[in-house]
Image (spheres, coloured by chain):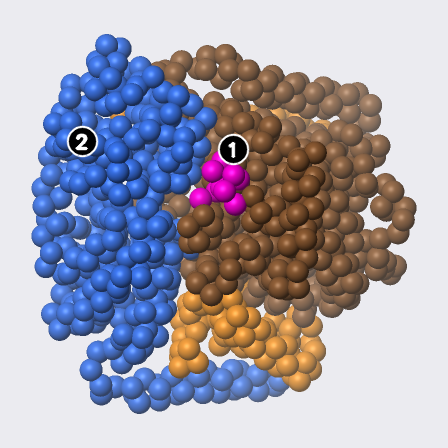
Amino acid sequence: MKRSKWSVMLALWICLGLMAGAAVSAFAQDKSFPTKPITYLTTFNPGGQSDREARRQQPLLEAILGQKVIVDYKVGGGGALGWSELVRSKPDGYLICGINIPHIIIQPLQQETGYKTEQIVPVSIFQRTPLALAVLKESPYKDLKEMLAAAKAKPGEISIGGSGTFSGHHIATLRLQKMTGAKFNYVPFTGAAPQITAFLGGHVNAIFGNSDDLVKHSDTIRVLGTADDQRFFGFPNAPTFKESGIDLVESIDRGVGLPPNTPEPIVKILEAAFLKIAKDPAIQEQMKKEGFVPLAMGHAESKAHIEKMTAIYKDIIKDIK
Amino acid sequence: MFRTRRSTDIATGVFLAALGATAAAAATGIGEGAGGQLHPRTFPMMIGALLFIGGAVLAIRAAADKSGGSKATAWPDRSGWRLLAIAMAGLAAYVALSQALGFIISSLIFVPWFIRYFGRYSYWAACSCALGIAAFIYFVFIRLLQLTLPIGPLSFLG
Amino acid sequence: MEAWSSLMDGFSAAISPYNLLFALIGCIAGTLVGVLPGLGPTAAIAMLLPLATMLDPAPAIIMMAAIYYGAMYGGSTTSILVNIPGEASSVPTAMEGYQLTLQGRGGPALGISAIASFLAGTLGVVGLTFFAPVLARAALAFGPPEYFALTFLGISLVVSLSGRSLGKGLLSALLGLLTAMIGLDPLSGVARLTFGSYQLMAGIDFVPIIMGLFAISEILVNAEKKTRMILEGKKIEWLPTWQDIKETWAATIRSGFLGFFFGLIPGCSPAVTSFMAYDMEKRFSKHPEKFGKGAMDAVASVEGSNNATASGGFVPLLAFGIPSGPALAVLLGGFIMYGLQPGPRLMQEQPHLLWTIIASMYIGNVILLILNLPLVGLWARMALVPFPILGPFITVFTLIGAFSLRYSFFDLWVALLFGVVGYLMRKLEFPVAPMVLATVLASMMETSFMQSITMSRGSLLIFFTRPISAAFMLLTVLSIVSGMLLIRKAKAKNVELEESDA
């Protein structure tokens, strides 16, 4: 008998909970977007750069949108897990997700990942991390020309460390090889920290690194070329590849995206919020200090950027495969 | 069946060998990486193969050693199996409920059930433990440590 | 001595009430996240980063650093009392400490672990103070071949520790390695053994595995027996005796050196250090037969090495700005938010700040000892809580801890599955430790192997031509041979005795 009394209590508890929930959501129905908390999904580990970016924006977004913003995580598969969840979510604007370029372009090109690049509706791209080719100060290669000459003289003996294969670093190396005819030995690492450690220890001859990682070690390294349109403010003396006659532009860009078929007005509201933050001079100053290039691309501009890069990467991936 | 160490060793050996063989077979389908000296399937195949060999050796040695492994395996008795199954089902239900209703409500159900079922303590004790743990989840995990735990219908608590 | 006067200068700043207050807050927060299984200093420090806009650099970084090393003190609590190792590095603590709790010696084990943490942690800070510039280069000597040799050594040591059941230890390690292969290849991102499931593409994290193997299987075992009290005897001790301290201090000091040294190597998983310390102590110990049944010196050694590793990790961080783990990476983020870039230049430009932080670490360790020792008696009383009440608490804390790592329910199902696996492994007498370490190290072992082969362009000789790597390889061979000899000897000596040793 005792058991049955117990199950009645259980049912009571559940009903109470459900009722309370229903009451609250009914109460909050008729207002314009957003009327309830927004989830900001991060596809990399808590504490990583994407998470820190989301945490930086969180209070500002709350102030602009007038709703709580909850930072949530869907970590795994180099981001693929979170992005495949994103494209399956309800397109109501209550789930926004950090996106990284080139990741969202390269992954679907490489294998079946559960999402397609075109499915993600970009809201804004707010941060760029240009890549740069660097050697240690003690290295014999004083500039890009010397290094390329050496690589041509002994093909495959100069090693370049990067983070992962089919990644921005890897593709930058491949493109450099293709454009110059030099041959390097590309050694992949599992992330920026092990990559930089091996580089500083002299276990690889050079690296393609992210600007924010390289800035931290500007005393001990020499940047041979920056893969951006302009010189990077952290290394004003380092020429761009373009200045050396090599049209190599590679960066890692961060932004946020929405599920496919999100209504236009919702995209606009979120775009305005993110752009307001991206254009905040204090935020831009912070980003620069950390070694990033602040951007403020809106929905249309981001979309065009992703399409342009997709076309470029398609050709490159075809070559590797 | 599976009463002695010998018989369980044979069974586990066969199981692990089969697992290793499956893994090695599945690993042959792993796609091409890019560049690099070794194919991404190298490690999974090697480990699968070693597991197959190891499992087979365990099974064969146990089968050959008729005297040594007669020690009984410490399986539970009938009521032990039942309790084990119920505990497992309870844990699974807890995870499923948490997914549906969030951690606070599911703990309010799971904790008193477990205490009552395995301990026959008073309702009063069971419920106060449940309330205590729910309060801890809310105040320490959600409020203080800011974990984004799902709380289901209670989401108005923020 | 230049370091000495700089340190004194640092102390005078660190001891100001304002800085002391933040060291205290950091220690308390660190202990809290350390005690809660699955939670760690990484998320706690990340949460505090926005404070950087409000506080001066010194108190903010003092607090973040205190969270980091404070979490190491808390980490042993749940391992010892309820067999939940919150992270891989406390697995050996759980293996020995929980046995002590069952014997009513949970209190002394907690006390010894606090004291060992203090002694070895302080030893590590001394190393950081006086030898950082000399030792910093050691951090960079480790390239991919060295990491591979180290992980290989780590796994073979643990397998050889399984003693009589060497074969089962090896199988257990292989099973762990295989589990870790599921998901995306860490280098190329190619999906492996995922059988088309997107969930599996995320891979199987080792923390839910550990929690399943230990905590959940513990619940299952006790549920099956309908246990009322987890204590085996009637006698309960609350605090360590002088005898305990006398018996363990040597182990503490040894592990302090070991831990500090491995702490210097960025990317060397703390799990390697604690298992190595455990293995070393078993070889040094006067009573190796106690290992696995509650050895106090093992607890001291593992906890000591954990804390010394934490101090050692500050060497590459301050010398080069290289973080040796996710928690220190976030701490580095803290420095950068202030526009401070750890490295040789910071040592010259901001010596006062750096020495204040280092000095605060001495103070922090004292605070943590004072904070933790009185708690020991309190925590130890948890052993008096009957299992039917303790069980659900263990479940809730374990599962929420496992959840908080990636915020994924999939991980909770993994924890339950490995609870069953752990239960079966206990019944079938498979050692769990090799599986844990193999799961933790698999990714590093594989990637460093791949990298080395790429560096050498296909030659395996690279592992034997570089001195550090060659030395580790030699140690590996020695450990395997000694493990096999031990079996031989044991077999010849007494078959009966062997049978009883699980």
Q: Position of residue C352 (x, y in %)?
A: 58, 47
Q: Which residue is drawn at 17% across and 37% down?
A: A249
Chain B in the picture: what colour?
A: orange
Chain holding disc 1: C
Is A64 inside the magenta-drawn segment?
no
Q: What element carries label 1?
A: helix
Question: Which chain: blue?
Answer: A
Instruction: Identify the residue shown where x is 31% and y is 15%.
Output: A157
Q: Is residue C72 above or below residue B97?
A: above
User: Is C483 positioned to the left or the right of A308 in the image?
Assistant: right
Give the quarter of the image for residue C31: bottom right
Please state, as top left, top right, bottom left or bottom right, where the C terminus of chain C lies in the image: top right
For the residue marked with disc 2, what is the amino acid?
A: Phe
Residue A78 visible to the viewer: yes
Q: Is mark 2 on a helix, strand or loop?
A: loop
Which residue position holds label 2?
A: A241
Q: Residue C240 carries which label?
A: none
Q: Relative to C50, does residue C185 appear above or below in the rendering?
A: above
Q: Kindly indicate which chain is depicted in brown in the rendered structure.
A: C
Work out which residue is located at the far top of the displayed protein and give it: A153
The residue at which mark 1 appears reads as C174
Whether residue A170 is situated above or below residue C357 in the rendered picture: above
Percent position (x, y) of residue C302?
Answer: 69, 42
Q: Can residue C208 be seen in this view?
A: no
Span of residues in magenta: C341-350
Residue C261's x, y, as percent? 63, 32
Image spot of residue C155 (x, y percent): 57, 31
Residue C290 as seen in the image, left or right of residue B129? right
Q: Main secondary structure of the magenta part?
A: helix
